[in-house]
Image (spheres, rainbow, N blue to C red):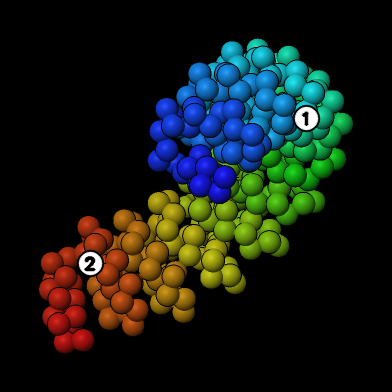
Amino acid sequence: MGNAKAVVNNPRTTGKTLDKYKDNEDWEVRYWVARNPNTTSETLDYMKDDKDGNVRRGIALNSNTTPEILDYMKDDKDGWVRCGVACNPNTTPEILDYMKDDKDADVRCGIAQNSNTTPETLDYMKDNKNANVRCGVAWNINTTPETLDYMKDDEDWEVRCGVANNSNTTPETLDYMKDDENVGVRREIARNPNTTPETLDYLKDDKDSWVRYGVAQNSNTTSETLDYMKDDKDDLVRGGISRNPKTTSKTLDHLKDNEDGWVRRGVAKNYNTTPETLNYMKDDKEEYVRREIVHNPNTTSETLDYLKRIEKKR
């Protein structure tokens, strides 16, 4: 029996071999047949009424399980089986919509997180009493800007984090949320590509360094805001500024002597750094900073020759 488990659990076992174990008396053997990525849809269909819930759950989770099999299993008496159906990438939007009121919160969570769930189903679930379900809705890439805006004041901070992170959230909603009491929400706003320069400027003095780092990295942050932040007390923030493509050559020159090597590396790497600044940095004590100078297209041939000579002497 131990050998059978080893065979069915092996990712190299063929579908033909796995089919031979579909009626094995040991439920664990049948479970690993159901979970094996090489098990054919025909074998999975044969096993869909297995008496063991663990086996049926394995079928529900298998990427080879067809929409037809998943539809058959959507009303399974075992909540974990239905959860597998809800999470499977092959489950159709119609099946997911059918299951949206499932009594099991884990099933509803799977539906809320599934990339096949329609905007209409997600909107229906936006007021679900379970916070984890609402969280799945907030993070789902199919959730509409209107639904996300509705959820912006959700009592659960993880739900609001999902709203703040979602690429479908509008600049207006993100601006509304900029004073959220939860630091995780403000961090997501600072990172979101839809956040406006004005909102990012507002967040530039946030007490949390990771919020300020998000501002420093965001491609929507203006050069004026980045210049204002150049002396931030946190190395992480200054490092983000030194790497931002909107940081001006003047600001980068200001950072060239920064005490933190990660900041200086960003300066050496940035394409806005002038040949003069790169030449000034050529004797930097950190090898990885000098290496970035070599790779920067703005570095002059004279600076490159100098770096080649000194590296031979090291």
Q: Earlier in the sequence, mark 2 or mark 1?
A: 1
Task: Choose top left, top right, bottom left or bottom right for residue 288.
Answer: bottom left
Q: Secondary structure at mark 1?
A: helix
Question: Of residues 137 and 265, which is closer to you in this image?
Answer: 137
Kindly identify the residue that appears in the image at 22 percent across and 67 percent down: 294
Label annotation for residue 294: 2
Marks 2 and 1, Cα distance to the nearest angstrom? 59 Å
- Identify the residue under disc 1: 79
Task: Report whether residue 209 is seen.
Answer: yes
| x then y, percent, for residue 286 | 35, 79
**Mark 2 residue crowding within 10 angstroms, few (<14) / some (14–19) / many (20+):** many
Kindly identify the residue that appears in the image at 53 percent across and 70 percent down: 235
- In the rendered structure, the answer to whether residue 54 lies left or right of residue 21 reads right
| x then y, percent, for residue 118 | 64, 18
Quadrant (top left/top right/bottom left/bottom right) for the C terminus: bottom left
User: How many tags in the picture?
Assistant: 2
Amino acid type, residue under disc 2 in the picture: Val
Task: Choose top left, top right, bottom left or bottom right for residue 60.
Answer: top right
Asked if the residue at tag 1 contacts the one at tag 2, i.e. Cβ–Cβ closer than 8 Å, the answer is no
Kindly identify the residue that appears in the image at 59 percent across and 13 percent down: 68
Amino acid type, residue under disc 1 in the picture: Gly
Question: Of residues 74 and 202, which is closer to you in this image?
Answer: 74
As drawn, 252 above or below 34: below
Q: Secondary structure at mark 2?
A: helix
- In the rendered structure, the answer to whether residue 136 lies left or right of residue 281 reads right
**Mark 1 residue crowding within 10 angstroms, few (<14) / some (14–19) / many (20+):** some
| x then y, percent, for residue 184 | 70, 52
As drawn, 132 above or below 85: below
As drawn, 264 above or below 314: above
